[in-house]
Image (cartoon, helix red, strand yellow):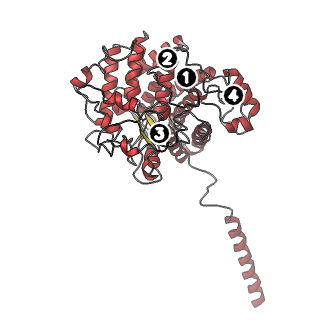
Amino acid sequence: MKKTALIFAALLTLGACKKDLTSLNVDPKNPSTVPSYSLFTEAERLLTNTVTSPSVNLNIFRLIEQQWTETQYLNETQYQISYRKQPDGIWTALYTNTLQNFEKSKQAMVLDVKDAGTLKNQTAIADILQVYSYYYLVTTFGNIPYSEALDINKPFPKYDDAKTVYTALLTRLDADIAALDPNSGSIGAADIIYGGDVNKWKKFANTFKLKMGITIADSDPATAKSTVEAAVTAGVFTSNDDNALFQYVATPPNTNPIWVNLVQSQRHDFVGTSQFIDLLNPNTPTQDPRLPYFFAKSASNNIYEGADNGTGDGSLAFSDYSLPAGALLTPGAIGNLTNPDFPGLLLDYSETEFNLAEAVARGYAVGGTIQSHYTAAISASVLYWTGANPTGTFLAQTNIAYATAAGATPLQKIAGQEYIALYNRGWDAWIVNRKLDYPALVPPPSAFSDFPVRFTYPISEQNVNKPNYDKASAAIGGDVVTTKLFFDTH
């Protein structure tokens, strides 16, 4: 009996060991399945980081657009985009990090979300942000992988024609807008931008549709006109309350990437350019109220002072110039752009009003006048940054008022003020600048190339996807920074 009991106990022990061994295959820190909402939130964060970051390895458009200049290492200021491989960084950030996470989120939603209406809304919101991501890829590189881009069975995707991609994105955006139903559920708090508010996402999508239409106004006037007019009829942003903001937090790792790169890293690599700061602080009675929110006074002289673009060589003392920073938070103001919780901005009302001003100038039926939209755009930008509406004195001064502002044409007047309003959004400023060719930016000394009107394809694509890379390069007219893209016709 005793022997039998021992054998039984041994069998139990062996059984327990077998069960434990099986459980060891489960890694609690790396789950085999991830909830759709966590993938969605991470994709939103990564997307916002990409368009917000000032990293020299990724988003150098503030330097290309001469809002900032470098104090020591001038590679990016001088248009050397191959040195730190920014094209590779953008490609990875948008394709691998952002688009793939949104795609996996949509796939997981099918399993996670049981209500059909809620699933439809969540899928549409994720898809809208994929359209947004592709917009920056196609306006940066030209022909890009699209139809095969996210297919795991296509490790070497073909490149699709840029204009064809753009048309497909507009069609896709229309389908997403039609799918959104405010009477059904949504993704809720997992959406950091709008908290899952379907009405706000519908307005965002139409506002982005307006933006996409205006972008192709020169290359495809008929499509641009119908796109813009349809978007405005459906409803676009009407105040700063509509702005698409991603709210960062005050503690790492979910902090504002500007704070990460400029404050946490304790680097002083960037200062304002003299050209940009002079626009804000001209020889007129009224200083631009946004200036203290864009830059700090120089530590040495206690004045707003910009450095001539591209003149730093290691000897440029950052303390003599205005660093990117901002005033202390005042009621209603957006805050200091170097604070860890300063929000990232994906789309805003000021930009929308400039797009409407441009639409009127082009003869589109969107209501209002060029001047009314132009003034509303400037006012919205001032209110967003400072928390207060601009004074009549400021709006009436020669360099601001529509009738007397710099620029030989209505589109140049609009572009000149939109350039200022797109401060801290250099990527968008670059898109507008290429389309309207204004303001004219003087190349920095010792520039490595002419002004870049596109980015070259990543080195990784040249190495691992060479046949498709070669076809794409030939199709656009050469993989160089001076090859104009489909929307840039001037």
Q: Which residue is mark 2?
A: 227
Inter-mark Cα distance, 2 to 4: 25 Å
Inter-mark Cα distance, 1 to 4: 18 Å
The type of residue carrying mark 1 is Leu
- Determine if residue 365 is in view: no
Give the percent coordinates (x, y) of residue 247.
41, 44
Q: Nearer the viewer, mark 2 or mark 3?
A: 3
Q: Which residue is mark 4?
A: 159
Element under label 3?
A: loop
Q: Which residue is mark 1?
A: 170
Callout 2 touching callout 4 (CB < 8 Å)? no
Vertical arrangement, residue 298 with respect to residue 406, above or below: below
Residue 116 vs residue 423, the one in the foreground = 423
Give the percent coordinates (x, y) of residue 359.
42, 15
Answer with the quarter of the image where residue 13 lies.
bottom right
Element under label 1?
A: helix
The type of residue carrying mark 4 is Tyr
Element under label 4?
A: loop
Q: Nearer the viewer, mark 4 or mark 3?
A: 3
Q: Earlier in the sequence, mark 2 or mark 1?
A: 1
Callout 2 touching callout 3 (CB < 8 Å)? no
- Determine if residue 404 is in view: yes
The type of residue carrying mark 2 is Thr
Q: Earlier in the sequence, mark 2 or mark 4?
A: 4
Give the percent coordinates (x, y) of residue 320.
36, 43
Tag on residue 85?
none
Element under label 2?
A: helix
Q: Which residue is mark 3?
A: 312
Q: Earlier in the sequence, mark 2 or mark 3?
A: 2
Instruction: Decide: few, some or many residues near mark 4? Use Cα within 10 Å; few <14, some 14-19, many ≥20.
Output: many
Instruction: Decide: few, some or many residues near mark 2? Use Cα within 10 Å; few <14, some 14-19, many ≥20.
Output: many
Residue 42 vs residue 425, the one in the foreground = 425
